Image (tube, grey):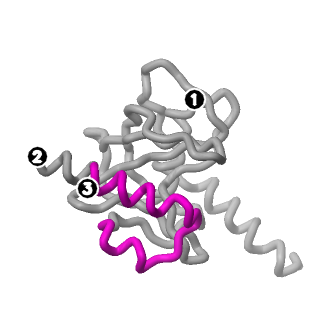
Amino acid sequence: MMPRRRVAPVLTLLLAACAPGTPPCPFGGAPEYASSAGCFTVSGDGLLLVQSLDGRISLPGGSREADESAQCTAFRETWEETGLRLQPRELLQVFDTGFHLYRCERDASSGDIDPPLRFEVRAVFYLPAARFDSYQWRFPQQRSLLENMLLEATDTLSR
């Protein structure tokens, strides 16, 4: 019999192996490279965020794979965490951790929020700036900057 502490990781690996493969990266521009990247995506007046299993929220994104551009990392990680196919556009911010944040737009082939089964994310949603204080942030130092970026983006969209 397998010890209990090993069952969860083994089960996670087995289920992840059954999940559909990552769609090919659609980015065709000049590649940039970073250790991690993610997407800044707005719908209505809300910013796309993921809630981790511990309840904290953050932008969708994560660590790059070997020989992967930052733009493709943003695409892949966002798809893995949200199920959305988002096209990386311009670089908006480089955080002190090296995380590259791209403005991303929904691809025409994207469906609705529907993350593949990977046991990384509790919830995915668009959060208006007025509700940012209702959640605990994974990177609290980013909250104010993201709030300002969201307010600027929604102001631009409403013009």
The kind of residue tagged 2 is Arg
Measured in 3D between alpha carbons, the distance from the residue under mark 2 to the one under mark 3, in whole angstroms, is 15 Å
Q: Name which residue type carries label 3.
A: Ser
Residues rendered magenta in the picture: 128-152
Give the residue at mark 1. 69
Residue under the point 83% across and 77% down:
5
Q: Is the stretch drawn in magenta largely helix, strand or loop?
A: helix
Question: Residue 105: percent from the left, percent from the top?
Answer: 31, 41
Q: State which mark lies toward you, 2 or 3.
A: 2
Q: Give the residue drawn at x 32%, y 55%.
A: 150
CA neighbours of label 3 inside 10 A, class few (<14), some (14 to 19), many (20+): some
In what element is the residue under mark 1?
Answer: loop
Q: Which residue is under mark 3?
A: 43
Residue named by callout 2: 159
Q: Earlier in the sequence, mark 2 or mark 3?
A: 3
Could you say where residue 78 lies in the image, as x and y percent from the top left? 47, 49
Task: Give the amino acid type for the residue marked by disc 1 in the picture.
Answer: Ser
Q: Nearer the viewer, mark 2 or mark 1?
A: 2
Q: CA distance from mark 1 to mark 3?
A: 25 Å
Q: Earlier in the sequence, mark 1 or mark 3?
A: 3
Quarter of the image containing the N terminus?
bottom right
Q: Secondary structure at mark 2?
A: loop
Please tell me how crowded label 1 is: few (under 14), some (14-19), or many (20+) other residues with Cα within 10 Å. many
